[in-house]
Image (cartoon, coloured by chain):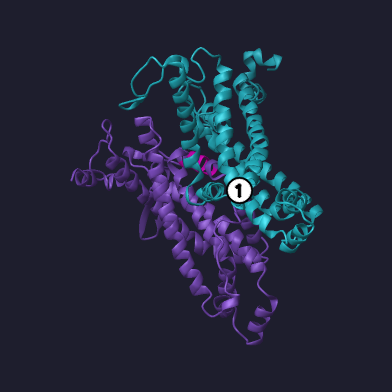
Chain colours: A cyan, B purple
């Protein structure tokens, strides 16, 4: 990165670290921190939106809608989230490829599952083999966002369901006596007030979401855990480094990063709840 | 019944007993159910031991944090902050890397008449290393729950105890700790469920599954990779987890009834499961 790094004499001095920490691989490592933040910023609103829909669905008069939303909201209580993170991406991937296979390659007869393999024709693959790398990355990242949204949407649904129930019944009755319909009651009475009751649960959810971001690693995305293992190890699948095992230092750096992230979030949440005067 | 032979071969495969080679081709439903069920043993092992030890140490740490000891309180506060503020996944990675760096031969501890060799290599194995991390993690979370409950114990309860002239030990045993447990049991139940779910992370975070003996998710993932069909192994493991979570809830509910046995009906607390998440 720096010009003096090209001189071999630098190896013996302490300045070498400034060169080491700014080499190309490390810059990719730093970029993956931004990826985590990006994931958080995209997932949180989506999960809140999905949770809101599911919470209203639980209160719905339609029997089918109620059953679906209830099952969705309750399923995360009994099953570890990591199972969803492993299950959802591969499932969605297979569903998409299966449909594309059925549409695009109608001439190929025979099951997609052959023995222990899942085989679709080449043009049904998503992303296509010929696509550039960034499309593959984007596809993987979108699947990750989808899985996080689905899991944390279910958590949010529970929070919102509780919050909707916390809005005083007398206010809803007042709305009814004014002749409001269901939609009007939701939009002008429940939704504006619900947030105060939902905030403690939502802030908890935000913390939960932050702490589950390292699971991106399991989805095969080159995130901070991936780079920490790659850069820290003395010998990895791709490279062999002259230094000894430094992984512990990289992971301690990640630990500090997460501690900072949760501490900052905690302070911001405290400020917001002080402003809103949370009744709980 | 062909399932019986599978049972004989794989029921305790996760402990390294039975057939050595995992099924590779012609994987039947029977194989999947039994092998994933065998992995559950590890999840239960981690959950039960970490929860039991963590329960005791969490109470101690909560009491330390509630009393203002000059250094001890500070240290415990930092400990709780680190373990609650960072993801368990990263904690596993960190701990594993630290354990790996420890000297391999083992530490000799001289006890005058005899020397004990601490096997440091055990720390890199999941059964001890991961257990320590889970124990420290659940201690931090539970102590935060208990600490919150300690702070909200009514002042006059303690004053009444003082007025009766109870000694410090009796006061804690008869008044403070029972009230604390009763008030925090709902949150603690959720913590227990979360810990049970967190045990699935162990074999995905550095800790190697020696001889392919891993936990339930390890085997579920193995089958999903081998058959390329996620629709069978993952619902099986999900069913196992729902079932055990329900048992966990029944046990904790029974304990809750025991804690509340002296109270009039309208003051009894019921547990809201995972409605208010504490993690």
Q: Main secondary structure of the magenta part?
A: helix
Tell me, yes or no, whether the highlighted magenta stretch contains residue B93.
yes
Left or right, A115 with reference to A244: left
Instruction: Please state, as top left, top right, bottom left or bottom right, where the N terminus of chain A lies in the image.
Output: top right
The x and y percentages for residue A250 are 57, 34
Tell me, yes or no, whether the highlighted magenta stretch contains residue B183.
no
Residue on which disc 1 sits: A57
Residue extending farthest bottom: B164
Question: In front here: A202 or A227?
Answer: A202
State the residue at coordinates (63%, 87%).
B164
Q: Quadrant location of residue A206?
A: top right
Left or right, A130 with reference to A114: right
Instruction: Please state, as top left, top right, bottom left or bottom right, where the C terminus of chain A lies in the image.
Output: bottom right
Residue extending farthest right: A275
Q: Is the residue B271 above or below the residue A191 in the image?
A: below
The x and y percentages for residue B57 are 52, 62
Question: In front here: A41 or B243?
Answer: B243
Can the viewer see residue B176? yes
State the residue at coordinates (55%, 74%).
B178
Q: Which residues are magenta?
A: B91-99
State the residue at coordinates (52%, 27%).
A230
Q: Secondary structure at mark 1?
A: helix
Q: Label 1 lies in what chain?
A: A
The crowd level at tag 1 (other Cα within 10 Å; few <14, some 14-19, many 20+) is many
Can the viewer see residue A222? no
Q: Is the residue A103 above or below the residue B237 in the image?
A: above
The x and y percentages for residue A111 are 34, 24
């Amino acid at each position: 990165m720096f010009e003096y790094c090209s001189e071999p004499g630098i190896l013996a001095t302490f300045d070498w670290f400034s060169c080491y920490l700014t080499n190309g691989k490390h810059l990719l490592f730093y970029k993956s921190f931004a990826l985590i933040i990006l994931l958080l910023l995209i997932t949180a609103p989506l999960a809140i939106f999905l949770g809101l829909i599911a919470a209203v669905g639980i209160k719905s008069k339609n029997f089918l809608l109620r059953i679906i939303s209830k099952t969705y909201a309750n399923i995360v209580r009994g099953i570890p989230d990591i199972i969803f993170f492993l299950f959802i991406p591969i499932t969605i991937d297979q569903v998409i490829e299966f449909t594309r296979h059925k549409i695009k390659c109608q001439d190929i007869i025979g099951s997609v599952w052959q023995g222990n393999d899942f085989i679709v024709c080449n043009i049904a693959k998503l992303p296509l083999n010929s696509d550039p790398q960034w499309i593959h990355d984007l596809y993987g990242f979108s699947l990750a966002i989808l899985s996080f949204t689905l899991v944390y949407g279910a958590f949010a649904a529970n929070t919102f369901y509780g919050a909707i129930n916390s809005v005083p019944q007398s206010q809803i009755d007042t709305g009814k006596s004014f002749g409001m319909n269901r939609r009007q009651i939701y939009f002008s009475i429940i939704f504006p007030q619900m947030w105060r009751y939902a905030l403690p649960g939502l802030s908890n959810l935000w913390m939960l979401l932050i702490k589950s971001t390292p699971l991106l690693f399991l989805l095969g995305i080159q995130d901070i855990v991936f780079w920490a293992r790659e850069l820290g190890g003395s010998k990895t699948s791709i490279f062999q480094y002259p230094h000894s095992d430094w992984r512990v230092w990289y992971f301690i750096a990640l630990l500090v990063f997460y501690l900072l992230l949760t501490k900052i979030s905690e302070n911001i949440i405290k400020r917001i709840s002080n402003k809103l005067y949370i009744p709980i | 019944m062909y399932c019986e032979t599978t049972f004989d071969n794989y029921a305790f495969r996760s402990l390294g007993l039975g057939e050595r080679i995992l099924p590779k081709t012609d994987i039947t439903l029977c194989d999947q159910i039994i092998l994933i069920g065998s992995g559950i043993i590890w999840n239960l092992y981690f959950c039960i031991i970490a929860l039991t030890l963590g329960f005791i140490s969490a109470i101690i740490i909560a009491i330390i944090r509630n009393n203002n000891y000059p250094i001890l309180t500070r240290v415990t506060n930092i400990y709780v902050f680190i373990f609650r503020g960072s993801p368990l996944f990263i904690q596993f990675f960190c701990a594993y890397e630290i354990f790996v760096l420890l000297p391999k031969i083992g530490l000799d501890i001289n006890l005058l008449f005899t020397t004990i060799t601490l096997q440091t290599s055990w720390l890199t194995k999941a059964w001890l290393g991961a257990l320590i991390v889970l124990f420290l993690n659940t201690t931090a979370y539970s102590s935060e729950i208990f600490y919150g409950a300690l702070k909200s114990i009514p002042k006059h309860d303690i004053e009444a105890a003082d007025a009766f002239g109870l000694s410090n030990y009796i006061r804690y045993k008869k008044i403070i700790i029972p009230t604390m447990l009763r008030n925090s049991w709902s949150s603690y139940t959720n913590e227990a469920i979360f810990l049970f779910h967190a045990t699935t992370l162990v074999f995905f975070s550095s800790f190697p599954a020696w001889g392919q003996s891993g936990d339930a998710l390890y085997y579920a993932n193995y089958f999903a990779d081998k058959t390329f069909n996620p629709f069978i192994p993952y619902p099986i493991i999900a069913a196992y987890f729902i079932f055990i979570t329900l048992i966990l809830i029944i046990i904790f509910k029974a304990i809750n009834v025991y804690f509340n046995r002296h109270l009039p009906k309208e003051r009894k607390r019921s547990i809201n499961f995972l409605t208010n998440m504490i993690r």
